[in-house]
Amino acid sequence: MATVSFRRAGTPRPIWNAASQILMAVGYILMAVALPGSLYIGSIIVGLCYGVRLAVTVPTASELFGLKYYGLIYNILILNLPLGSFLFSGLLAGYLYDAQATPTAGGGNTCVGAHCYRLVFVIMAMACIVGFGLDILLAAKTKNIYTKIYRSRRSKKSSSSTESNGH
């Protein structure tokens, strides 16, 4: 049997995740270079990509693992938001900021300029590139599953159209 082409059946969700990872890496690199306005543009790109990932990851999990344990899988997937925020924003960004900052007379640290968070943005971009590779691997591993899903959808459409025509 011939496989269903992407053009006729649509793009598998892991490919959308991979595309959002690459765009997110571009957004982080834009923020790291610190050109005028690049923080705004990079933030918009990263925010849109987070939205794409949230919108795509949860249905992907239901397609790949089914609905029996959907609540558990959903909560595990959503756990990445606070966990990633803590690891990258709380620990990594805080530690790297303190490494770049200079002590002040009041006992705190201060850092002014793009160099304060540049390494954080570069590390985040590298994490996105690793995520891109993992998403591509997932897309390759789930190709047969998505082929079956698309065939099932097409057969349902064709059977419903023949029923509506009175055949």
Image (cartoon, rainbow, N blue to C red):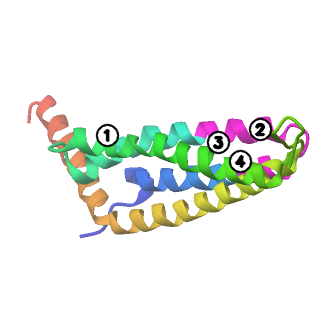
For marks 4 and 2, the one nearer the N-term is 4
Question: Going 23% across and 58% down the picture, which residue do you hit?
Answer: 148
Mark 1, mark 2: which one is toward the viewer?
A: 1
The tag on residue 24 is none
Inter-mark Cα distance, 1 to 2: 31 Å
Within 10 Å of the Cα at label 4, are there few (<14), some (14-19), or many (20+) other Cα atoms? many
Residue at mark 2: 41
Residue at mark 3: 46
For marks 3 and 2, the one nearer the N-term is 2
Estimate the x, y position of residue 14 in percent, counting from the top left: 43, 55
Q: Is residue 158 magenta?
A: no
Amino acid type at circle 1 is: Asn
Estimate the x, y position of residue 110 in percent, counting from the top left: 85, 41
User: Tag 4, which secondary structure?
Assistant: helix
Left or right: residue 18 compared with residue 9: right
For marks 4 and 1, the one nearer the N-term is 4
Amino acid type at circle 4 is: Gly
Question: Going 72% across and 58% down the picture, which residue do you hit?
Answer: 122
Mark 1, mark 3: which one is toward the viewer?
A: 1
The answer to which quarter of the image holds residue 59 is top left
Residue at mark 4: 27
Asked whether disc 4 touches disc 2, contact meaning CB atoms under 8 Å apart, the reply is yes
The tag on residue 75 is 1
Magenta residues span 28-48
Inter-mark Cα distance, 4 to 2: 7 Å
Asked whether disc 3 touches disc 4, contact meaning CB atoms under 8 Å apart, the reply is yes
Amino acid type at circle 2 is: Ile
For marks 3 and 4, the one nearer the N-term is 4
Inter-mark Cα distance, 1 to 3: 22 Å
Frontmost residue, 32 versus 66: 32
Image quadrant containing the N terminus: bottom left
